[in-house]
Image (cartoon, helix red, strand yellow):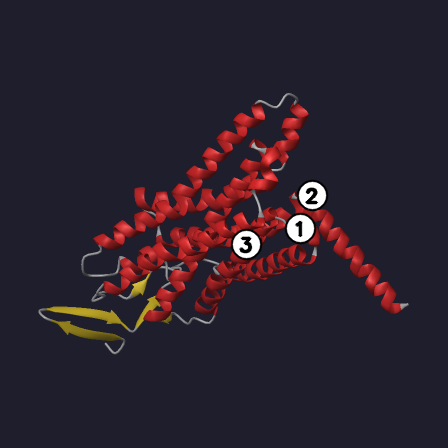
Amino acid sequence: MDYIQSVSNLNATFVRPAKFYLSGFSNVPHVKYYYVFLCFAYIITVLGNSFLLSTIYLVKTLHTPKYMIVFNLAFTDLCGSTALIPKVLDTLVFDRRYIVYEACLSHMFFVLVFVSIQSWTLVTMAFDRFIAICFPLRYHSIVTQSVITAMLLFVWAFSFSPLALTVWSIDRLSFCRSLVVKSIYCDHAPVYLLACNDTSLNNILAYVAFVVVLCIPLVLITLTYVCISVALSRIATGEERLKAFKTCTSHLILVAIFFLPIVGTNVAAVTTYIHPNARIMNSSLTHIIPALLNPIIYSLKTEEVLISIKKLCKRNRITNTTKKG
C-alpha cells in the first residue's frame, strides 16, 4: 500500500502511515442537516466571541481581572472552534477523508489543548467568584490583574505540557492494520486504538489527561461552590443571599454546559458500549455547544456586559449622527 511507510528496526517492523482515513458517520439519514448546523454554529461562534472580545477590549470599565478571564475564555472558544469545525466541514462536505499523519496529530493536539484551557479557565472564574463572595473586603487586593495574568499564563503552559506528551505517545505506535479512524476528526482514542503494538502507555496517558483536564477542574469548582454556599448561608437576609448568588449564575451555566456532556460522554465510552455514530455526535457537540453558547450567556446574563453593549451602541449612534451632520 502506497500510503504506508515501513521502517525495520532490529527484528521488529515499525509501521507509520502516511495518512489516516476519517470514516465519519455511517448510514445516518439526513446527515447533511448536521453539516448545515455545524456551519451555522461556527458562524455564530465566531461572531459571538468576536463581539464579546471587542466589547471587553473597547469598554474601559471592563478592563478588570474578572473580564480578563472572560476575555481568555472567549478567545479560547474562538480558537478551539476554529481548530475543529473548519477541518470537520472540509472532511464531511467536500469528502476529503484522508488526512496526513502529521496533520492528524497536530489537529488532535490543538483540539485537546483548547478543551484543557477552557476547563481550567472555568476554574479561574470559580476562584474569582470564591474570593468575591467569601472575602469581599479583600477581593481587590487578592484578585489583581497581575495575579490573574499569572494564573492564565499558568493555565496555558500547564495545558500544553501533559497534552503534548499524550499526543507524542501516539508517535511511538505502529499502525500495521486498519487506518480507518471511526470519527469525523482525529480524536485521541479512535486513533491510538488502531495501533497493533502495546498501547498501555497511551491508555494510561488518556486516563491521566481525562483526570487532569476534566476531573480535577470539576472537583475544584465543586469545592469552591461548597465554600460559597457555606458563606452565603451566613448572610442574614435572603435578598442579599440571592443578590450574591446571582453573580455566580453565568459561571454555573457555563460549567454545566461544558462539563456535563463531555464528562458524561467520556465516562459512558469507558463503562459501556457506544455506537460510533453516537460517540462522534456527542464528542463533536461537546466541543461545539459551549463555545457557541458562552458569549450569548455572558452577553445576556451579565448586567455589566449588557450595560457596556448599550454604551457602545449609543456611542456609535452619536458618532454616526455627528458624521452625517
Furthest-right residue in view? 325
Where does residue 232 sit, x and y in percent of width and height?
58, 27
Residue type beneath disc 3:
Asn
Q: Which label's residue is closer to the chain start, 2 or 3? A: 3
Along the line of sight, the residue nearer the viewer: 263 or 272 = 263
Could you give the CA–CA distance between mark 2 and mark 3, rounded to whole angstroms?
19 Å
Pointer 2 residue: 303
Q: Is residue 13 above or below residue 312?
A: below
- Specify the amino acid type for callout 2: Glu
Give the alpha-carbon distance from disc 2 to disc 1, as whole Å.
Answer: 12 Å
Percent of width and height locating residue 50: 62, 60
The answer to whether residue 163 of the structure is visible from this angle is yes
Q: Secondary structure at mark 2?
A: helix
Residue farthest along the bottom direction in this orientation: 2
Residue at 31% in and 60% down:
191
Label 2 vs label 3, nearer the camera: 3
